[in-house]
């Protein structure tokens, strides 16, 4: 049975809210006797025993209070007692529900004596979070969000659900604009803060990558006293990030990557079955081990995770051993065997979002993928969004990556992908469409036994539907 996360009295004390219930006064005690096992901001995935937080966003969450109790909510965090609340349903009334959620998050942090790690970066945040979940587990209980909850709602939601006895908490922090990371990292107060990389992403909202680097560096402002900055040695902004971390009061620095002098350095990487073999140097100590997730970019993410794990006192030997059994998350490299006639092709699902850096990494992953007899490498690419005025050239520039990876055929979706299509050699052109749905049949018709096919694009490009259709044709080989 899941342990209680919040009692009514604890939640009221944390938020300064009032416990009440609509209806007969004789039901008043019921309003003070509930206990919750989790927290939800969406009635569609609310679990019985959750506190439902009625946030005001595109829709007012108070409209869904009845749905929450129909789904088994233990209580609802509301701003004023809504008239649609069921009679006797326990309510925790606060002035502002988002602030109430933040108050729960702060209280959860203060009552937990484990270590917290925060992760940001232009690519690899969720993968690194999931790798951390896996490599920390042998050293103690780990709390992390099951999804990519990295915004002003997701971070406090994840922190508010931090169990009192968790040994480690891992928090992904994202941003689209300058200033968004600061309040989130100051909420989490991490003992270690990772920047996976700095690259062109969300350029629609920034004048330059320099500004993106400054925004990512905000993560260090929340470091606890004695906190450690985990920095990407291969990135051109390494020195800038280190300076910003120093200014924020970081007490230690650990670098990771392929560059000479990196504390956690990748010396050699090669594909091995569904995963990889790695040779690394950890503070000068050379180690060789297996990693269950393919791709050199994922190996670098692993080094960032190992660096953070070491900084919070986890057992490195146990973490390295755990790396062999890790698998890619859905939409981030998970593989599926697709039945094609009497044979099979391999789907590499990289469909969760994209920017030029993550797209190049996914193309490289496809380039390393094993093929069957007469197999080809096929890329299905959706447009990359939020890149501003540089979007056309950044899309066209992918042609170089595709050629270097020896990709045989390319299918593209979205108007911006016309720029890549025009830059491709004619022999590499598969098919194009401005709507990903219109590409599905072309992709399926092109597949043959022995092929490896990779799907990648920004979420709004819609290419995830292609990955979903292909996935339904097969059986997953790996899943998180």
Image: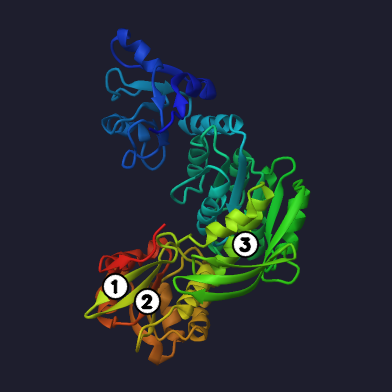
Q: Is residue 477 above or below residue 245?
A: below
Instruction: Work out which quarter of the rendered image holds the N terminus and state it.
Output: top left
Is label 2 in a helix, a strand or a loop? strand
* Disc 3 to disc 2: CB gap under 8 Å: no
Residue extending furthest toward the left: 341
Residue extending furthest toward the top: 26
Of residues 410 and 345, the one nearer the viewer is: 345
* Disc 1 to disc 2: CB gap under 8 Å: yes
Q: Sequence-wise, which precedes: disc 1 or disc 2?
A: 1
Q: Position of residue 287 (x, y in %)?
A: 65, 67
Is label 3 in a helix, a strand or a loop? helix
Q: Which residue is mark 2?
A: 453
Q: Which residue is mark 3?
A: 303
Q: Bin the neighbour count of mark 2 within 10 Å (Cα to Cα): few under 14, some 14-19, many 20 and up.
A: many
Where, by quadrant of the figure, is residue 334 drawn?
bottom left
Q: Sequence-wise, which precedes: disc 3 or disc 2?
A: 3
Of residues 95 and 18, the one nearer the viewer is: 18
Q: Is residue 213 above or below residue 376?
A: above
Q: Bin the neighbour count of mark 1 within 10 Å (Cα to Cα): few under 14, some 14-19, many 20 and up.
A: many
Q: Which mark is residue 338?
A: 1
Q: Is residue 261 above or below residue 246?
A: below
Q: Which mark is residue 261?
A: none
Is label 1 in a helix, a strand or a loop? strand
Of residues 310 and 139, the one nearer the viewer is: 139
Q: Sequence-wise, which precedes: disc 1 or disc 3?
A: 3
* Separation (CA) of disc 3 from disc 2: 27 Å
């Amino acid at each position: 049975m899941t342990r209680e996360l919040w009692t009514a009295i604890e939640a009221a004390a944390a938020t300064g809210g009032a416990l009440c219930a609509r209806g007969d006064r004789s039901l008043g005690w019921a309003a003070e006797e509930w206990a919750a096992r989790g927290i939800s901001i969406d009635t569609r995935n609310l679990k019985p025993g959750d506190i439902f937080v009625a946030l005001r966003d595109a829709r007012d969450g108070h409209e869904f209070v009845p749905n929450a109790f129909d789904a088994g909510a233990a209580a609802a965090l509301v701003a004023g007692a809504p008239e649609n609340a069921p009679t006797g349903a326990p309510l925790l009334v606060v002035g502002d529900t988002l602030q109430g959620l933040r108050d729960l998050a702060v209280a959860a942090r203060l009552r937990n004596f484990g270590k917290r790690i925060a992760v940001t970066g232009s690519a690899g945040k969720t993968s690194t979070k999931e790798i951390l979940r896996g490599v920390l587990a042998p050293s103690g209980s780990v709390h992390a969000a099951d999804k990519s909850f990295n915004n002003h709602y997701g971070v406090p939601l994840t922190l508010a659900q931090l169990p009192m006895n968790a040994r480690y908490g891992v928090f992904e922090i994202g941003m689209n604009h300058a200033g968004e990371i600061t309040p989130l990292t100051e909420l989490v107060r991490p003992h270690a803060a990772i920047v996976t990389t700095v690259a062109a992403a969300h350029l629609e909202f920034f004048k330059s990558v320099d500004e993106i680097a400054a925004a990512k560096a905000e993560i260090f402002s929340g470091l606890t006293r004695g906190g450690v900055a985990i920095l990407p040695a291969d990135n051109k902004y390494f020195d800038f990030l280190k300076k910003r971390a120093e200014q924020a009061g970081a007490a230690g620095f650990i670098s990771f990557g392929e560059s000479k002098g990196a504390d956690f350095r990748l010396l050699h990487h090669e594909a091995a079955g569904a995963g990889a073999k790695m040779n690394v140097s950890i503070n000068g100590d050379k180690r060789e081990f297996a990693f269950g997730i393919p791709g050199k970019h994922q190996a670098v993410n692993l080094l960032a995770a190992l660096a953070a794990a070491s900084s919070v006192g986890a057992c490195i030997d146990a973490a390295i051993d755990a790396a062999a059994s890790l698998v890619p998350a859905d939409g981030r490299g998970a593989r599926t065997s697709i039945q094609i006639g009497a044979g099979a092709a391999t789907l590499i699902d990289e469909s969760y979002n994209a920017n030029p850096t993550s797209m190049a990494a996914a193309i490289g992953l496809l380039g390393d993928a094993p093929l069957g007899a007469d197999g080809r490498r096929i890329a299905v690419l959706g447009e990359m969004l939020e890149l501003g005025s540089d979007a056309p050239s950044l899309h066209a520039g992918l042609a170089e990556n595709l050629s270097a990876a020896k990709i045989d055929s390319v299918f593209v979706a979205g108007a911006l992908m016309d720029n890549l299509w025009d830059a491709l050699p004619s022999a590499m052109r598969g098919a194009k469409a401005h709507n990903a749905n219109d590409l599905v049949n072309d992709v399926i018709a092109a597949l043959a036994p022995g092929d490896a096919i990779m799907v990648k694009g920004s979420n709004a490009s819609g290419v995830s539907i292609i990955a979903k259709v292909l996935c339904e044709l097969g059986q997953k080989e790996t899943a998180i």
